[in-house]
Amino acid sequence: SISTTTSIMPTAAKKHRKERGGMHCGNGRIGKHRKHPSGRGNAGGQHMHRIAFDKYHPGYFGKVGMRFFHYKKNPYHMPTVNVDKLWSMVGLDQRKEYAKKSDGTVPLLDVTQHGFFKVLGKGKLPQQPIAIKAKFFSKQAEEKIKNAGGACLLTA
């Protein structure tokens, strides 16, 4: 199979052709071109390459913080949504439909069905009442929803 990374430069024009017969091919007589004279990869980070590691990667070695044995992701799973995104889950058609109604019915939005557990208070909420069902509400989010005439319903 032919490699796709072939060079267009003719072999005769390459540096290595010209170096042929020159014994060291540009790698010097004293240092010599050996395989891996300073180790492969990150070898020697605490020994011969310590100065470079300390200079360019401070804090690379060692530990920090406390260990958490048997960390379970489930109790800490808390996807959040801000109040400014709530109406986009309801949809524009439904919003207009409920705006016309005068009997006091409001749309009920269950954010857990959209994959969110907690409602946060970033952004503005339009002055149209909405009922939100969620597992958790921040103080600001609850305040903004109630100021708009809506309701916060907690679910287990």
Image (cartoon, rainbow, N blue to C red):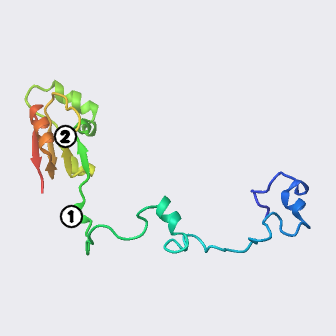
Q: Residue at x 15, y 29 (%)?
A: 128
Residue where numbered disc 1 is placed: 75
The amino acid type, in three-letter code, at marker 1 is: Pro
Of 41 and 91, which appears nearest the observer? 41
Mark 1 Cα shell of 10 Å, populated few (<14), some (14-19), many (≥20): few
Label number found at residue 115: none
Q: Residue at x 51, y 71 (%)?
A: 45
Of 20 and 153, which appears nearest the observer? 20
Q: Residue at x 19, y 45 (%)?
A: 119
Of 95 and 46, which appears nearest the observer? 46
The amino acid type, in three-letter code, at marker 2 is: Gly
Quadrant hosting residue 38: bottom right
Quadrant hosting residue 88: top left
Q: Residue at x 19, y 50 (%)?
A: 118
Q: Seen in the image, is 31 located left or right of residue 115?
A: right
Label number found at residue 121: 2
Task: List the single residue furthest toward the front.
Answer: 30
Is label 2 in a helix, a strand or a loop? loop
Residue 60, how many percent across, how many down? Answer: 43, 65
Residue 137's place in the image compared with 42, above or below, is: above
Residue 31, how many percent across, how many down? Answer: 74, 71
Residue 5's place in the image compared with 84, above or below, is: below
